[in-house]
Image (cartoon, rainbow, N blue to C red):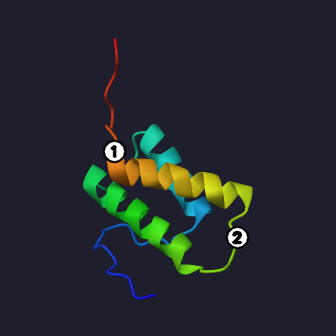
Amino acid sequence: MDWNWNDTSIKLPYTSENLRTLLDTVCRKENGFSQYDFAMWCDNLTMAFEDDEGEELNDYDSLANGIARDIDVNGICFGVKKN
């Protein structure tokens, strides 16, 4: 299927491993990208998973897809402490 890929400054392939890498980077507060770029990258990841029509996702990719959808839909807050 032809998707309208989001523009993002994050130039990593759309894989569950790269999602983990990006999340680790955010948790360490070492990200050089915006929350918006991360959300757009996550949206592209969900489209990449959907693009693999007929292929069943393994458990790890299925979990990554769910996390990416949550980030895309709900957004995330960087560096916000809850009291």
Query: Callout 2, which amino acid?
Result: Glu
Residue type at mark 1? Answer: Asn
In the displayed structure, does residue 31 sit left or right of residue 21? Answer: left
Q: Is residue 51 above or below residue 70?
A: below
What distance separates the C-alpha of mark 1 from that of mark 2? 25 Å
- Nearer to us in this view, 42 or 13: 42
Q: How many marks?
A: 2
- In the image: residue 77, left or right of residue 45: left
Against 48, is 33 above or below? above
Q: Nearer the viewer, residue 37 or 47?
A: 47
Q: Which residue corresponds to the image point at 61% horizontal and 60% vertical from the top-left?
A: 17
Task: Classify 64 as above or below 27.
Answer: below
The tag on residue 74 is 1
What residue appears at the point 52 percent right and 73 percent down from the top-left corner? 50
x then y, percent, for residue 80: 31, 28
Q: Can you see residue 21?
A: no
Q: Residue furthest right?
A: 58
Q: Position of residue 83 (x, y in %)?
A: 34, 11
Residue 19: x percent and y percent?
53, 57
Residue ID for mark 2: 56
Q: Closer to us: mark 1 or mark 2?
A: 2
Q: Secondary structure at mark 2?
A: loop
Q: Is residue 12 visible?
A: yes
Q: Is residue 49 above or below residue 27?
A: below
The answer to which image quadrant residue 78 occupies is: top left
